[in-house]
Image: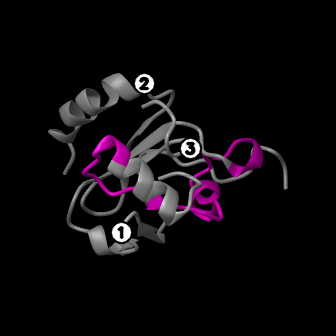
Amino acid sequence: MSKDTVEAQKKFAEKNKLTFRLLADADGKVIELYGVGLAFGIAKRKSFLIDSKGKIAKIYESVSPAKHAGEVAADLASVP
Amino acid sequence: MGLFSGTHLEPGASAPAFTLLDQHGKSVSLAGLRGKRVVLYFFPKADTAG
């Protein structure tokens, strides 16, 4: 998710053929809720792995987009 | 409110609830995803590299 409108997320997903859900946090409230906001409310690149009971299983700081899918896939194996 | 406001979340804490619209205009809530493992990936701006 990012501080973008639904329309911006739609264009981004279509342009890059993204299949996962892009959430539009247009007013930045969820970004603030998760403490990931920088100047102007824009989110830093950070991920939260949440287990099936709604608890945070792992937090990833300084996410590298290229490597992230791989590291999350590996971690998911040990998350309930 | 300072520049770096917001909660400091730790593993083991409950992920804060939210409901937002996805790129298709559909409502997605964290509560609705209970029972599944979720990866919440924050990024700065749509249409940046990566």
Crowding around mark 3 (Cα neighbors within 10 Å: few <14, some 14 to 19, many 20+) is: some
The mark closer to the camera, 1 or 2, is 1
Q: Residue furthest left?
A: A77
Residue at position x 20%, y 35% in the image: A73
Q: Is residue B24 magenta?
A: no
Where, quadrant-wise, is the N terminus of chain B in this rendering? bottom right
The residue closer to the viewer here, A7 or B10, is: A7
Position of residue A71 in the picture relative to residue B45 (left or right)? left
The residue pinned by badge 2 equals A64
Query: Tag on residue B45?
Result: 3
Residue A77: % across, % down: 14, 39
Q: Secondary structure at mark 3?
A: loop
Figure coloring: one colour
Instruction: Provide the chain ID for the residue under circle 3.
Output: B
Position of residue A52 in the picture relative to residue A64 (left or right)? left
Residue at position x 45%, y 29% in the image: A63
Q: Are marks 2 and 3 on the same chain?
A: no
Residue at position x 51%, y 56% in the image: A8
Position of residue B5 in the picture relative to residue A56 (left or right)? right
Crowding around mark 1 (Cα neighbors within 10 Å: few <14, some 14 to 19, many 20+) is: some
